Image (cartoon, rainbow, N blue to C red):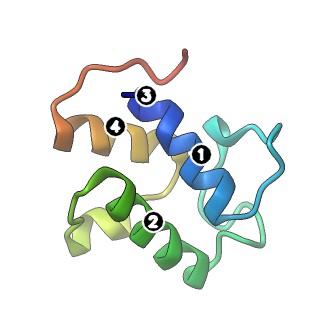
Amino acid sequence: MADIAGRLREVFVTTLELDEGTDVENLAYREIEAWDSVGHMTLVAAIEDEFDVQLDTDQVIDLSSFRVAVDLLRSLLSEDVPVHD
């Protein structure tokens, strides 16, 4: 199984239709046009599907960057994986 950060990178790239070389590790909500409110909910749904988790309302609201998403998933999945490979 791929690590959380790697899998999450793919979710961000696919869902937000980013170029493969995009630096998602420093990406934050509303920093790019694709990550607007609709893109945010689409991203949340894709994360939930990929990782088989259910985010609560506070987690959805707090999901403000790639790094926050990694930390959130690490805590939900209890997997100690570094953000950087």
Q: Secondary structure at mark 1?
A: helix
Quadrant housing residue 25: top right
- In front of the other: label 3 or label 2? 3
Label 3 or label 4, whichever lies nearer to me, is 3
Residue of label 2: 46
Q: Are marks 3 and 1 in contact (CB under 8 Å)?
A: no
Residue behind mark 1:
10
| Residue at the extreme front of the image, as rendered | 1
Q: Are marks 2 and 1 in contact (CB under 8 Å)?
A: no
Alpha-carbon span between mark 1 and mark 4: 16 Å
Question: In which image quadrant can residue 45 be found?
Answer: bottom left
Determine which of the numbered discs, if any, sits on residue 78 in the image.
Answer: none
Name the residue rendered at 21%, 65% in the picture.
54
The amino acid marked with disc number 1 is: Glu
Is 18 left, or right, of 35 in this rendering? right
Q: Position of residue 19 (x, y in %)?
A: 84, 50
- State left or right for residue 38 relative to residue 78: right
Label 4, on which residue?
71
Q: Amino acid at mark 2?
A: Ala
Which residue position holds label 3?
Answer: 2
Q: Quadrant of the C terminus?
A: top right
| Label 3 vs 4, first from the N-terminus | 3
> How far is mark 2 from mark 1, CA to CA?
10 Å
Give the side of residue 63 with respect to residue 80, left or right.
right
Picture quarter containing residue 37? bottom right
| Residue 36: x %, y % from top left | 64, 77
Q: Amino acid at mark 4?
A: Asp
Mark 1 or mark 4: whose residue is earlier in sequence: 1
Label 3: state its secondary structure: loop
* 19, 24: nearer the viewer: 19
Using a 10 Å C-alpha cutoff, classify the residue at mark 3 as few (fewer than 14 neighbours), some (14 to 19) or many (20 or more): few
Q: Nearer the viewer, mark 1 or mark 4?
A: 1
